[in-house]
Amino acid sequence: MTLLVAVINVSDMSESAASVIIAGGGPAAVEASLALHDLAGFRVRLTLVAPDPDLVVRAYEVLAPFHERYERRYSLARLAAEFDIELVRDALAGVDPSAQTLALRAGASRRYDALIVAVGGRPMGTLPGAIPFRGFKDTSRLKELLMSSQAGRHPSVAFVVPSGHTWPLPLYELALHMSTWLADRRVTGMPLTIVSAVSAEVAGLLASHRVGFVSGHAFRLDSGRLQLAAGRELDADLAIALPRLDGPHISGLPHDADGYIPVDEFGRVPGVQHVFAAGDATSASIKQGGLATQQSDAIAELLAAEYGAPIQVSVNRPVLRAVLFGGRERRYLYAELGDRLQETSRASVNPLWPESSKLLGRYLAPYLEKLDEAGSRPTAPKGGLQ
């Protein structure tokens, strides 16, 4: 009789579980899935809607032109099977908050009790005349540039950070790695310059690697001249630029002029019940994976508590933790965003937190580390280059 009662209770719990749909397949979406699985447990039924089959850790893609086998991909199907998550290979097309339904790109609709939008930003065009660096897909073009330098072609190269919402560290790393790669092969006469506002710590690191920097906004590369704001120009045969990011412009949800979704400190979308957002899709000015996972954790805590889990809900107070792979050394960057930014901002050659991964997340980092150990993936070189 006791066993029968237990079976009935489990069935009742499964039927009454809240349907939480997480739209996206990046760090914010996966962190939200793992956090809700842990914190809410049987109280939720999780659905992950993702257009791509894998989580791609883009923080490591900057190493791809210089090393083989540094693309980091993790199967979402494996994640879904391990944590009892329904995986839908599709993309979010729109939301009807009044009906608590979402539309998928393929035409189907889904009802939700809670929706977490973590679809990321939309990479737009790059600087006119520049070589785009969007990650692994542009590796071959950068390898061609490296090989041509050994054949005697030494163009001046500008690394351009776009204006607006972005995360500039990958471009700094690209310049530092290229400088070290060239120095190791005794290639000289190939000027490298960062076009971006940089901190004193980053400026010192760039200078020690013979990478120049110019503060300002670039408009276009034309006939060996990089056009800058206020009528300034910079000699540059080539420019490598990050794409400009735009918001996802989700139909049915509020967004700013650039398409980004506003959120409060708990990840709630103002004026829309039962809808949350995290990561690059939000109006947060800094687009970084670690900050995205912190937003997801705050959402997961709030939802788990609302569905009856005995946990303490905390306000998301974003803390920036970043690892800058700089040639043969690393810099660990830390700052508490908001009012305490100036007094807490610091950089160190020694780790400032226990985790060693470039992609930090309370649940995501240990999960990916476990997969790496099981799959014997290569780890990033101590200083980024071998």
Image (cartoon, rainbow, N blue to C red):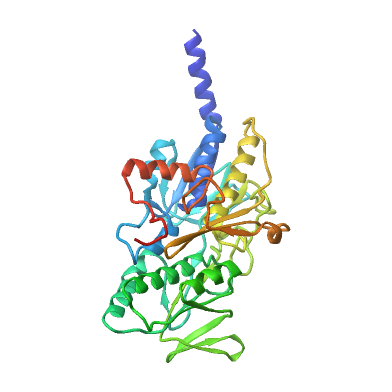
Screen quadrant of the C terminus: bottom left
Residue 377 visible? The answer is: yes
Tell which of 328 and 324 is nearer to you.
328
Camera-nearest residue between 87 and 79:
79
Residue 297: give x, y in percent of width and height.
58, 44
Q: Nearer the viewer, residue 300 or 153?
A: 153
Residue 280: percent from left, percent from top = 55, 59
> Among all residues in the image, which is located at the extreme right?
339
Does 276 sit above or below residue 210?
Answer: above
Image x and y of residue 32, in percent:
53, 45
Q: Is residue 268 left or right of residue 203?
A: right
Depth order, front residue of 100/366: 366
In x, y percent, where is residue 138? 36, 69
The residue sitting at 42% across, 92% down in the picture is 223
Residue drawn at (66%, 48%) of the image: 316
Residue 370 in which image quadrant: top left
Judged left or right of residue 103, residue 133 is left
| x 52%, y 67%: residue | 168
Asked if residue 110 can be seen in this view, the reply is no
- Residue 257: quarter of image: bottom right
Which residue is painted at 52% across and 13% down in the image?
Answer: 5
Left or right: residue 103 versus residue 286 is left
Is 259 left, or right, of 158 in this rendering? right
Marker count (numbered):
0
Q: Is residue 226 above or below residue 335?
A: below
Which residue is the extreme one toward the left? Answer: 151
